[in-house]
Structure formats: C-alpha cells, structure tokens
Amino acid sequence: MTRLRSLPEQWHRLDVTVRDLPLGLLLLAMSLLPALHNRGTEIGGLPAHTLDALGVVVVCLQSLPLAVRRRWPAAALALVALGFAVDQLSGYHLIAGTALPIVLLSAGSHLERHRRATVLALSGAYAALAVALSRTGPGESVAGYAAFYSALALAWGAGSWLRHTRALEAERRRRVAEDARLAERTRIARELHDVVTHHVTAMVVQTEAARYLTAAPDRLDQTLATVTDTGRRAITDLRHLLDLLDPGHGPEARTPTVGRIRTLVEQTRRSGQAVEFTEQGTPAASTGSADLVAYRVVQEALTNALKYARGSTTSVQVQHSEREITVEVSTDGSGSRARVPGGSGRGLVGLRERVDVLGGDFSADPRADGGFVVRARIPAGSPS
C-alpha cells in the first residue's frame, strides 16, 4: 500500500520531458491505427488521403514535440503547427491534429518571451493556411475558419490564464515567506532587547553601587560576585537566543518558565532594588507561550524599575489559573528619579504585541504617587 502511495511522488520526480512524452506517444499510436485514419481534425474540405511515408512524418511532427512542450514551448509549437498545416494541405486529417490545441495551451502557460510576436505570427500563419486551403479545394466558410480560430485562441487564452494564476500564487508564497522572515526577525529582536536590556541594566546598577563600597571589602566582593553572576546569566540567555536560528533545536531550551521569575526577582534585589514577590495558584498543565510572555513582562518591568525608579519598592504578583496567567508589577514613587518608563519604548510595545497575539490584555500606566504599574492577562495553552 505504501508503495502504491509513493508512485505519484516518484512520477513527479521524473524529468518533465519524460512526463510529457506519454501523451505524444498516445497520439502517435492512435494516428497510426488503420481504423482511425482520416478521423482527425479537418478544415478546408480537401478529400481524404491515405497514410503514406510523408503522412508518418507528419504524424511524428505533430505528436512527438509534445514531449518538450513545457521545456521548449516555442519550438514545440512551431513544429506542431508546421505538421498541422502539412496535415490539412495533404488531406491526411490525422488524430495527431489534436496536438495543436494542446501545445497552444502549454505555450500560453509556459512561454516567457516574445508572447505577442508569437500570437501575431500564428495568426498570420493560420490566415495563410486558410487561403491556401480555399485555393486548393472546396474550402471552408468564413464562419468555419473563424470558429476554428476561436477554438485555438481559447486554448491559448486558457494557458495564459494558468500562467497568470501561477504567477499570482508564486507572489503570494513569496509574500508569505517574507512576512514569516520579518516576523521571525522581529521576534528575535524583541528577545535580544529583553535579554540585553535587563542584564546590562542590572550590571550597570551593580557596578555603580560598587564604586561606593571600597571601604567595605566584604560588600564590595559580594557586589562584584553579583555582577559576575549577572554576566553569566546574560551569556546563557544569549546562547538560548541564538538557538532560535537553529531549526533542529527544541523550544524547551530557549523558553524560560514562570518558575524563573523568582530568579529575576532575586537578581533585582541583589542590584539594590526592594522587590516583594507573590505567586499564587497552580500553573495549568499546558501553558504554551504564556510562560515565556509572563517571564518577559516581569523582566521588562523590573528592568524599567532599575532604570527609572531606583530605590522604590517594587511589587511583583503572579497568579496562575487553568485558563490564564495574570501578572502585575508595580513600583511606587518613593525612589530616586521615579517616573513612568520612557526610553525607546520598544520593550513595552513589544510586550503589548506579544500579549495581544495570545489574545490577552496588557497595560502600562502611571500611578498617582509617581510610580508605574504594568498589568498583563495572558491566556494559557496558546501555541508557541
């Protein structure tokens, strides 16, 4: 059964010429059958002629070029049209004449260059054929010639429509691929912003504090150790971020969990910021991307607290339920330089977009006392 299912796949792996050849061979075989002689296309009203050596050549000229109708559409069209003209002028009226609309359809679909010149040349050749047939035999009515020309034009038009449809689909796929690449680059930029901003801010704050601890060697050593630990965490997170570029790497290594929020809180405390942390509820069995987004919300909010509200009391509250994760990070205005987070705004905008994608709610608002509060409700179970 598996073998049968693989046959279409194996067929499509063959060269296009090999796949196009069977139709030409079929028309060739049918045209050579005695029972089907003079049963093909007939215009001009010339008397039927028995198949001879020239007729066999005409059969081959009309049927075999179908094998290259997609690879070399112009050459296949020229050969089939020539064979068709000789067929009609000689009175063979072969089944192979069916190849003409087929090759016109294929040329309309696959011919890339000189399309207008091809149409004009074929129209002129058809007009010359109609004149020659009218002079050689009883001829065809003008309506008959026009009807046959319309049928050929319809075949070309159908091929052109297929070509246009194929071009539209290729453009759609290109845009989808470009949008996907842009979304991935944006996601990586957000991750890089979150990781670098948080860790570097913590290291800068800790290093500034160390300048005033030269008289207290124990506290200075502890502060420098914290800086070293923060740097190591930054390296680890950056390595995880680089794993985004590795398609074979699983998502679990690069996706922080809500359990690591406590680590963020401890790191911020060692940087000199008073942080109160509360975690309630039981996480859902499957949180999807909610864990990562909650982690990034707390990370960005704590980074802004270090940058813009140093010395203020910061509160981190995380609440789990079966359907969502709720995060609230608030800072009062008691510290130095307390103000609503500014800067480039990239972090807060990125967080809002992340939460919106998962169908949640996000807000970052100033408080009456000069501090700020960040709130996020993140539905659990959304795919990564």
Image (spheres, rainbow, N blue to C red):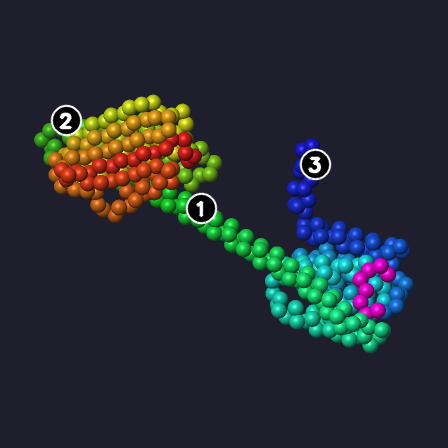
Question: In the current view of this chain or complex, which residue is farthest to the bottom?
Answer: 135
Vertical comparison of 300 with 285: above or below = below
Q: Quadrant of the N terminus?
A: top right
Mark whose residue sits in front, 1 or 2: 1
Distance from label 3 to label 2 (Cα)?
76 Å
- Marks 3/1: CA–CA distance: 35 Å
Query: What residue is rendered at 30% in x and 44% in y?
Result: 349
Residue 270: where, in percent of width, then height?
Answer: 20, 30
Q: Which mark is residue 180?
A: 1
Query: Residue 4's mark?
Result: 3
Whole-number angstrom distance, CA of label 1 to CA of label 2: 51 Å
Counting from the top left corner in percent of width and height, residue 55 is at 85, 63
Q: Secondary structure at mark 2?
A: helix
Q: Which residues are magenta?
A: 38-45
Numbered disc 3: secondary structure: helix
Badge 2 density bin: few <14, some 14–19, many ≥20, Cα 10 Å: few
Amino acid at circle 1: Ala
For image coordinates 84% across by 59% down, the residue present is 39
Image point 88% across, 68% down: which residue? 47
